[in-house]
Amino acid sequence: MNFSYETPPLGTLRDWLNFRAKEDGTAFFFTDGSEPLSWKDLRSGAIEIAQALTTYGTAKGESVAILQPNGREGVLAFYGAVYGGFRATMVNLAAGRDAIAYALEHSEARIALVHDSVNEMYQNSRPDQMQRLASFQSKEIPLHQINAADHALLMYTSGTTGRPKGVVHTHSSLLAGGWTPVIAHHLTDQDRALCVLPICHINGLCVSVMGALVSGGTVVMAQKFSASQFWNQISTHEVSWFSVVPTIISHLLHSDKNPDAKSKARLRFGRSASSPLSPDVQTAFEARFDMPIIETMGLTETAAQILSNPLPPGTRKIGSPGIAFGNEVTILTSDLSECAVNVEGEIAVRGPNVMLEYLKNPEATKSTFHGEWLRTGDLGRKDADDYLFVTGRLKELIIKGGENIAPREIDEALYSHSDVVEAAAFSRPCETYGERIEAAVSVCEGSTLTEPDLISICIEKLGNFKSPDAVYFLSELPKGPSGKIQRLKLQETL
């Protein structure tokens, strides 16, 4: 069952967990002090939950709702569901009551694995027919027979422009989602990853958890990110790499905490994903902490990673999420033909990590696919070396006076000032130009930055036409479960 850098993993998650359990190694450490999980313990716990769900009468491929924060119980709940042949429905605990209620209803799950800390939220959101599986009383009965093409995961998109869509992944696409970071980052069974991102989001689940299953490495799991504890966690658990999002990188950069010398020598790289990383933030972070940040790109629909910059000494291009690993990525024109080099179009991907479908939404599934190509809704271009540069999202483009303006251009101008911790530009209706540009920022404590200061920076870098008419100062910008700033919410709330 050892993985190959050339071909995606075969089999099911059950096969791979059985294989890992034959080895003498630790699968998970937990920063909250919970007892670690060896691969053998993880398999035993997964079997216990799988048999309890089977005893309850859960059908093969049926949704099992999982409402768990990062931690020992959450890991066991996920593996128990998929080991038993069920569709692990990872519920985003930060989504709000309406979105949680929609996911529970739409998934048609009859049973839920719920952490005590979120039981009140569950009770306020659950459909009448749903029951909480509070104890794992089971008997030794045969589990469902499963194969690589069976449903393994149901995860809902953020739903910022309408109802969330339920993304369905199979055992094979989930394993491929763990394989892509393994081959891009040369992960082995000697690596330890710090996971501070929620595993109810595709980044935390596939990059960290699935990556460890495929490589045989170890995950150090924190319940959530803490700037004050981050470097201590890396030191205490002898972490060799970490996966975060740009907002976390910015917060670490503006923190007064630093890694110790042993940690800096041991850390191979940090990884950034979920939204574009500002070149100024990346350059400043690498200069301060003397470690490479590998910018990547992924989606819920592609089991996380589709692109990554190579590790040093390979060429990393600042401002690009890199090249394809384990799948193919292209740029499509408006008539869905492939773009020439350095011509902007829609980013599309095909490969073993691509989702099966949107649950109960054949229209959305059909419109998302162009043959084998999954259309991402992101805009970008490829250079002559096949490095991709993201220029924006189709749904977030600002159209001012008939000209398309990518909000990221304004974001990066704002981030160029060292006091800016978070930044996001967005559009407003305008009678003169159709849309005008505004932005929101959060700044470090003690900053004396003003709105005219930031607008002047933008004018200097971008010119008057692309600069914001207003800049709002907030203590924190709204974010989704992955830490991605939700610029469309700024339009609604400001």
Image (cartoon, rainbow, N blue to C red):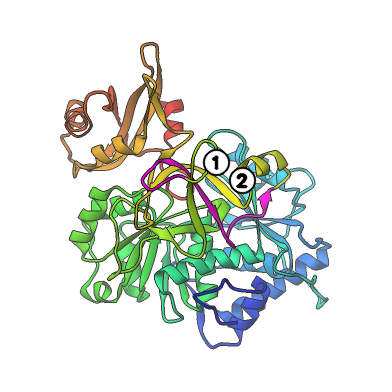
Closer to us: 457 or 223? 457
Identify the image quadrant of the N terminus: bottom right
Q: Is residue 421 above or below residue 47?
A: above
Residue 419 at least partly seen: yes
Q: Please report the bounds of the magenta region as a residue range.
A: 339-358
The residues tagged by marks 1 and 2 sit, at their Cα atoms, a distance apart of 8 Å
Q: Which mark is residue 370?
A: 2
Tag count: 2
Secondary structure mostly seen in magenta is: loop
Residue 73 at least partly seen: no
Q: Position of residue 94 (x, y in %)?
A: 52, 46
Task: Name the side, left or right, on which 196 lies relative to 86.
Answer: left
Residue type at mark 1 is Leu
Q: Position of residue 488 (x, y in %)?
A: 45, 32
Q: Is residue 44 above or below residue 127?
A: below
Q: Which mark is residue 119?
A: none
